[in-house]
Amino acid sequence: MRVSSQNRNFSVELSALGYPGFAYLRARRRRNPAEVLIDALNEPNLDARVAEGLPWLAMTYVDMDWAWLVRNAKVRDRQNRLGFAAFLASEVAEGKNDKERARELRQYLELLESARLAREDTFCHDSMTQTERAWLREHRSPAAAHWNLLTDMKGEHLAYASE
């Protein structure tokens, strides 16, 4: 039985999957990383620290069932969010000189590219103000603009990118 998103603690779920940013939390049972990823990407508003963990999830569990993940992202119109998370994951993998993981992630990006939505979205921060939205339109990364997302997140700024 699925837990309502209102009762979800994505921090604990990421901790259970080994995310170092929440290593201090007591983790309960591990859920399927693909389910955690798609459920989190479907949230209108996530804690910024949780959102930063989503590319880590894509990079660490690169062997997830991406066909299922892409299909479910499309059903929920979240393919841009998934594409951006996969892009950041590939950036981090490249920065760590993990060429095989980066190559696999780029293959998944190709699957998502043909399904990219023209509609503007956020990276799980729908409650931002119009002023924040206007600023991000001017200052977002080329990758965020490509995926039509309003976010200032970059792979190089993620804490685990330099570990």
Image: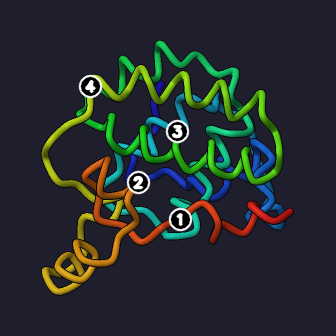
Please give the residue where the numbered disc 4 appears in the rendered image.
Answer: 115
Name the residue carrying label 1.
154
Residue 64 x %, y %:
64, 22
Q: Disc 3 versus disc 4: distance between alpha carbons?
A: 18 Å
> Disc 2 or 1, which lies upstream in sequence?
2
Q: Which residue is mark 2?
A: 143
Q: Residue 74: give its label.
A: none
* Whole-number angstrom distance, CA of label 2 to CA of label 1: 9 Å
Residue type highlighted by circle 3? Leu
Which comes before the other along the chain, label 3 or label 2?
3
Q: Are marks 3 and 1 in contact (CB under 8 Å)?
A: no
- Identified at 67% across, 48% down, the residue is 56
Q: Which residue is mark 3?
A: 37
Whether residue 33 is situated above or below residue 95 in the rendered picture: above
What is the CA distance from the residue labelled 2 to the residue labelled 4?
A: 16 Å
Q: How far from the left and from the top, in percent, is residue 133? A: 20, 75
Which residue lies at the image location 62% right of the left edge and 45% below the top edge? 89
| Mark closest to the chain's N terminus, 1 or 4 | 4
Q: Residues within 10 Å of mark 3 (few under 14, many from 20)?
A: many
Which secondary structure lies at badge 1?
Answer: loop
Q: CA distance from mark 3 to mark 2?
A: 19 Å
From the top left corner, tell me how far across and down residue 25 is, in percent. Answer: 78, 63
